Amino acid sequence: IPFIAPLIKSENHTIRFYAVFIFSKLRYPEAIPYLLDAIFDSSPKISLVAIEVLNRYKTFPKFSIVLSRLRSEMVSNDMGKVRIAALSLGQFKDLESVPQLIKLLSSKSESVREAAQNSLRDICKEDLGPNPKDWNKWWQKHSKTPRILYMIEGLSHKDENIRYLSIEELRELTGEFFGYFYDAPKKDRDRAVERWKEWWKNEGSKRFMKEG
């Protein structure tokens, strides 16, 4: 394995791709710095795969270098790197990046603004559009709220995609389901949401507040 990680920096596109991909099957924390560099690969395909692979390394202590680097890149003068960093932090559900993502909604770069808005939606399970004032108001109210409550609230969102993303992340995070289907009739969804809220009140808050 130690000989594979350096191949992520190969000049050959195909070698780079498979070198990144193999670490989705092999857990090797020492590969994290190489995978981090691959996020900024000139190939969008390799970049996306690197983000997906790194998502599986979030529980490793070394993952902190990924978040630190990406947060610093959001204030770069290179708009390409800013866009990729913003998108990546959304995929990693990095709550600390929310204030800077809100600032990026005022970027002169349309692609950066779009990336920031998408990531805010992914992290916060809310869609307030492109206006930073609306997001700042929301953040002032919700910045101290446990993020899992964003997901529970997202189950009732009018946007079907946000409902889908919310239940998928909740199921992955908690192992619970409570009969919620994002595309079910509203009355059925509402009943399931009440079960989620009861779970949070009676069990989830103790479990996740303690873990946090």
Image (spheres, grey):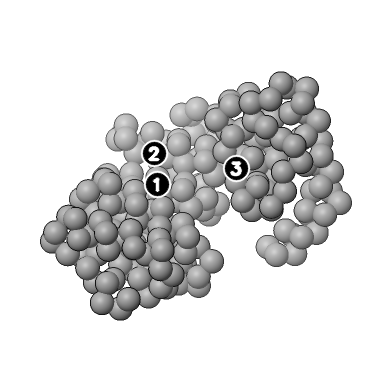
Label whose residue precedes the other's in the sequence (3 or 2): 2
- Foreground disc of the pair 3, 1: 3
Which three-letter amino acid code belongs to the residue tagged 1?
Answer: Ala
Residue highlighted by disc 1: 86
- Up the image or down, 210 lies above or below 76; here it is below
3D distance between C-alphas at marks 3 and 1:
21 Å
Which three-letter amino acid code belongs to the residue tagged 3?
Answer: Glu
Quarter of the image for the C terminus: give it.
bottom right
Furthest toward the left, the residue is 11
Label whose residue precedes the other's in the sequence (3 or 1): 1
Kind of element beneath mark 1:
helix
Residue highlighted by disc 2: 115
Quarter of the image holding residue 164? Answer: top right
- Identified at 79% across, 48% down, the residue is 200
Asked if marks 1 and 2 touch (Cβ < 8 Å), the reply is: yes
The front one of 151 and 138 is 151
Q: Residues within 10 Å of mark 3 (few under 14, many from 20)?
A: some
3D distance between C-alphas at marks 1 and 2:
6 Å
Residue highlighted by disc 3: 168
Residue 33 seen by the camera = yes
Label whose residue precedes the other's in the sequence (1 or 2): 1
